[in-house]
Image: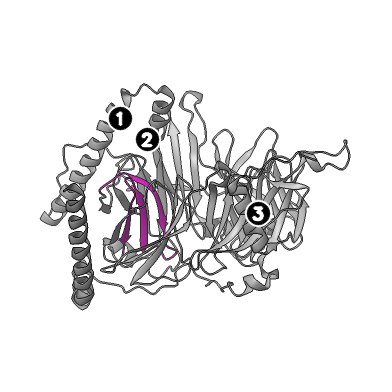
Amino acid sequence: MKKGKPDTDMEAACKAEESRVEALSLSRAAELPESTNCLTCSEDGRYLGLGHSQGLSVWCTSSLTCAADWLEDRLEITSIQMTSMAETAYLLGTIDDMGVARVFAYHCDTIHLLSVVNIMDDINKRSVCLTFELSHGGQYAAATISCNGAVWLEVHHFPSETWVKELEMVVSQTQEPISSGDLGVKWSPLSVATKIKPPKITAGTTLEGPHAVQVTDFLTYFSDLDVDTRSHQEKEQSFDTNAEKRKQTNESTGYCTQHFLLPCAQFPGDRTARSQRGLPVAVCVWWMGGRNLLQYLLKKAPKNEPDVEPMPDMLWPNAKKILCSAVSRCTRYIALGLDNALVSVWDRQYGSQLSVVSMSAPDCAISRIHFADHWHVSTDEVRLLLVCKSGAIHRVTTGRGTKCCTTLLTERPKDSGGLPTTSASVPFLQSTFLVVQRNGKMFLQDVVNKTTVRCLIPPETHLIATPCSPVYALNTKRQTLFIRGDQDSSYSATPKEDDGQSHLLVFHFGESDILKQFIVSPPDSPQQEETQSFVSLEQTCNLYLQQRALSVDERNTALAQTWKQLQETAAETQQSCS
């Protein structure tokens, strides 16, 4: 056994918390393939995707048995996603350790390789896929590509309906299981819908029509301003004597973050997709080190001008550099964590800011941001969860014309082991987040009542694998957490036992009586909120002005409260200076 060390104050507090809060015991466990790096779960909860050092596998979640494998020597999958194309067909997107992105389909107990996203035809022009995200339903995928120092975002359109027909045709033509290579099968190719590059300073663009010129001037001005600010920051960092810090900064300036957006009846492109509920119509993008949030409609590039860079259909400027972002499930609201402890929430319905919040708490450098209400979306207010670099966690409640309310949920830990490495909303538990700490502790936190609901305890023989970046997946339909656990060498039964063996640890939240009161039934469609549709931008503006008129009393009250606070702060400052 390991020798014990004197308990610190934080360890004593953690033990006291664990003794007060009932633990949720392990439900099941199963042996994982060697070096399982990533997990994903299908929306219907039936299957689990595993990426490992020999390829990928699909498991049945009810029996925890392997349903299909796609294996290839010296190919290690490091990232995996899964979404449903049809009732019996699932799409998988992966990235391997060489930065190659692939698209697979799981159908009739077989995994088929449909396409390689970044094929390396020329070794001197080797492209690396940094991120790869599938949209819900598998209609689109966003890939961040790096090649020879250049970085861009490719949004691919998938022929999902054609792929489903091809899969059914292949199954009908043969009774034998198809090999993992799918030799002789030519799948329909994917196409690049949009190729987005980092913004550059331009001399200006001339378009026909006065309205188009005005929009272009607005976009060009703020885009050029953003690029100019970033260039000044890079020049200042070039004089930094810390070579390692300068290298990390230069490598991260080209990266981008994107989110797929559902119809919100704000732009003409949204109206054409009203008949296809649940399918994205746009993608929003922000570049590392930039201040602008850009929106691009998902439309195919013109055949006669395939290399023309698309112009953003919408630009939302911000006062400070963007650090992190989150999108509500209906994708109407976009929350941004900014530099200098600022939070900005944009409302796509009206194309304006819902609120701007300044965090007054010390050491509140925002590292991650989440929407606290996974299913419920109110037009009056939103609740956010902010995770700071210091380890503190705050809840922010804000809305249009209302007073902002900030609540400290978790204080800054005294020990680095208490730093939260993962904080994720649990979709099937109301206002509950899963928190994983650097020391391997896991618990469920009620972000409304500021209480720890349950601690998740692995068996004594295992530890949570890589707690700084845990390998896990949440199954919404089965209300289950799947997480990888590595065997603890301190509890080896025999010297021959393999200490490095990993297991899939399963926690079923429905087995706890206390958690049952938090369980909510998720809707089938990701777009539950009904949004009004408008024929023109004029109607959108009219509705916005009507709501402003209705909320004038509420806004005047908030303005009076803010003015009173400013006067009190000025009086206190004057007294302290005298």
Amino acid at the residue labelled 1:
Glu
Number of numbered markers:
3
Given this view, does label 3 or label 2 mark the residue nearer the observer? 3
| The image quarter in which residue 496 lies | top right
Identity, as a three-letter code, of the amino acid under mark 3? Lys
Name, please, the residue furthest toward the left. 210
Label 3 belongs to which residue? 15
Work out which quarter of the rendered image holds the N terminus and state it.
top right
Q: Residue furthest front?
A: 578
3 or 1: tag closer to the N-terminus: 3
Q: Are marks 1 and 2 in contact (CB under 8 Å)?
A: yes
- Please identify, in this view, whether the residue under mark 3 or under mark 1 is nearer the observer: 3
Work out whether 392 lies above or below 525. above
Q: Label 2: which residue?
A: 253
Label 3 residue SS: helix
Q: Nearer the viewer, residue 395 or 294?
A: 395
- CA gap, disc 3 and disc 1: 46 Å
Residue at figure coordinates x 64%, y 37% from the top left: 76
Q: Position of residue 267 (x, y in %)?
A: 28, 63
Instruction: Measure the C-alpha gap from mark 3 to mark 2.
Output: 42 Å
Q: Is residue 115 visible?
A: yes
Magenta-drawn segment: 319-348
Residue beneath disc 1: 234
Residue 535, quarter of picture: bottom left
